[in-house]
Image (cartoon, rainbow, N blue to C red):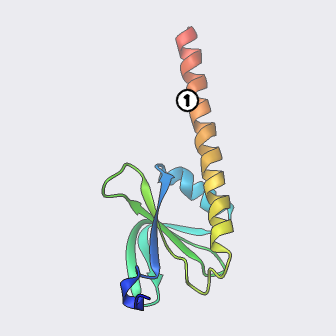
Amino acid sequence: MRGHSDYMSHLSILPTLVIDLDLLEIALRSEGFKVLRGGVVSSFDSYQLVDLAAEHPSGLQLGWRQSDTHPHFDLVADLAAPEGSGMTEPVLRRVLRRYAMNQAMRQAEIFDAETVTAGI
């Protein structure tokens, strides 16, 4: 069995498909998060700089920062924090579902505008 220090830090960075922080901010605010562009997500004695920080009234903190290698933003979250206590995954699913819906609606609006313009 490995020692605790052999495992990744308790701060997990998970890739997401988020490419538009404006739409993400709308989704987060809809789920009750206070959102700050630029900021820090704290985790025990560790702090991570992020492009967008979000805090839920329960104390749950989520952050997103630009990926070094891809055009999307990576999720930064302390999945072991007591504030998360089982709510992180369902809340994150709801936020990302809202984000995807907002993104699809925006794409549909762009498509409609292009279709109308092309028909003139």
Q: Residue at x 40, y 91 (%)?
A: 3
Looking at the image, residue 115 sits to the left or right of residue 63; the answer is: right
Q: Residue at x 46, y 82 (%)?
A: 10
Q: Amino acid at mark 1?
A: Ile
Point out residue 30 in the picture as x, y percentages from the top left corner. 67, 60
Point out residue 36 in the picture as x, y percentages from the top left corner. 49, 68
Residue farthest to the front?
A: 1
Point out residue 21 in the picture as x, y percentages from the top left corner. 48, 54
Q: Give the camera-side residue of 91 and 5.
A: 5
The answer to whether residue 70 is above or below residue 5 is: above
Where, quadrant-wise, is the C terminus in this rendering? Answer: top right
Q: Give the camera-side residue of 9 and 62.
A: 9
Neighbour tally class for label 1: few under 14, some 14-19, many 20 plus, Cα within 10 Å:
few
Count of numbered circles in the view: 1
The answer to whether residue 112 is above or below residue 18 is: above
Where, quadrant-wise, is the N terminus in this rendering? Answer: bottom left
Point out residue 38 in the picture as x, y percentages from the top left corner. 41, 67
Q: Residue at x 39, y 81 (%)?
A: 47
- Regarding residue 50, the answer to whether it shows in the image is yes
Tag 1 secondary structure: helix
Residue farthest to the top?
A: 120
Q: Residue at x 40, y 79 (%)?
A: 8
Looking at the image, residue 80 sits to the left or right of residue 32; the answer is: left
Quadrant of the image occupied by residue 66: bottom left
Q: Give the camera-side residue of 97 and 109.
A: 97
Residue identified by numbered label 1: 110
The answer to whether residue 21 is above or below residue 32 is: above
- Regarding residue 32, the answer to whether it shows in the image is no
